[in-house]
């Protein structure tokens, strides 16, 4: 599942009309409504505040906000869907420049603004993250310590009769980490999963 990592702002001028694209990661309708209200305050006196959002694939909506039917919100929604993005809100604000664009011109301007926002953003993917513990004897501390510190997120080390590392890894590297620790820990599988959760993790642009 892919979403956007953070707020992205872009701008397009088309025949003196100013189009401002605002792209957000969102989790629920309350957050969407708050961001729509915030956009109206941040960009006052605009002619149109059009938008589209998708939540959890099957919950989606678009608004033309006074533009001719399906010339604004719908093309914005199509850009979101074509980028396979979920849990996101894309607002395009228009300040009218005095020149009518026509239906085709409006669709192109709103689509281009939405596409530009997608091009400029960073994406995030929901992956399963595991909190784990690995135990080792002092004889094997050096290699275990190096693997944990270099290849996982170390949360805690407890130096008792044995050393207990608490660490974070994820579905992409869990088995690789397990195998490396096994080979460095007297060929014993001492990695134990304590808990797991799905979190948004930033990916390539």
Image (cartoon, rainbow, N blue to C red):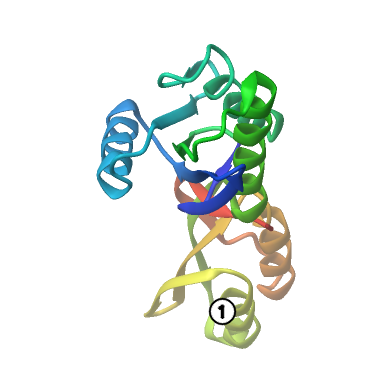
Q: Nearer the viewer, residue 113 or 203?
A: 113
User: Residue at horizontal 53%, vertical 85%?
Assistant: 138
Residue 21, position as x, y percentages in the image: 51, 44
Looking at the image, is 118 positioned above or below residue 152? above
Identify the residue position indicated by label 1 in the image.
149
Q: Quadrant location of the C terminus?
A: bottom right
User: Residue at horizontal 54%, vertical 79%?
Assistant: 137
Per the image, label 1 sits on a secondary structure element best described as helix
Looking at the image, is 27 positioned above or below residue 56? below
Residue located farthest toward the front when viewing the structure as drawn: 98
Q: Quadrant location of the N terminus?
A: top right
Q: Nearer the viewer, residue 169 or 62?
A: 62
Looking at the image, is 202 positioned above or below residue 25? below
In the figure, is residue 147 to the left or right of 65? right
Q: Quadrant of residue 44?
A: top left
In the figure, is residue 32 to the left or right of 107? left
Residue 161, position as x, y percentages in the image: 40, 79
Confirm whether residue 85 shows in the render.
yes
User: Residue at horizontal 57%, vertical 82%?
Assistant: 145
Q: Residues within 10 Å of mark 1 (few under 14, many from 20)?
A: few
In the figure, is residue 144 to the left or right of 43? right
Confirm whether residue 127 shows in the render.
no
Looking at the image, is 160 positioned above or below residue 11? below
């Amino acid at each position: 599942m892919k979403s956007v990592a953070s707020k992205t702002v872009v701008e397009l001028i088309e025949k003196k009309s100013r189009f401002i694209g605002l792209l957000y990661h969102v989790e629920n309708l309350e957050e969407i409504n708050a961001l729509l209200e915030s956009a109206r305050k941040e960009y006052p006196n605009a002619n149109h505040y059009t938008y589209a959002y998708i939540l959890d694939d099957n919950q989606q909506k678009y608004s033309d906000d006074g533009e001719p039917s399906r010339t604004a919100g719908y093309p914005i929604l199509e850009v979101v869907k074509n980028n396979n993005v979920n849990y996101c809100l894309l607002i395009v604000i228009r300040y009218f420049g005095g020149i009518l664009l026509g239906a085709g011109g409006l669709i192109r301007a709103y689509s281009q603004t939405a596409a530009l926002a997608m091009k400029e953003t960073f994406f995030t993917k929901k992956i399963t993250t595991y909190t784990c513990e690995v135990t080792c004897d002092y004889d094997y501390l050096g290699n275990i310590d190096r693997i944990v510190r270099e290849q996982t997120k170390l949360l805690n080390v407890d130096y008792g009769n044995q050393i207990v590392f608490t660490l974070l890894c994820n579905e992409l590297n869990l088995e690789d980490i397990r195998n490396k620790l096994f080979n460095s820990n007297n060929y014993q599988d001492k990695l134990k999963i304590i808990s797991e959760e799905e979190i948004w993790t930033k990916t390539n642009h």
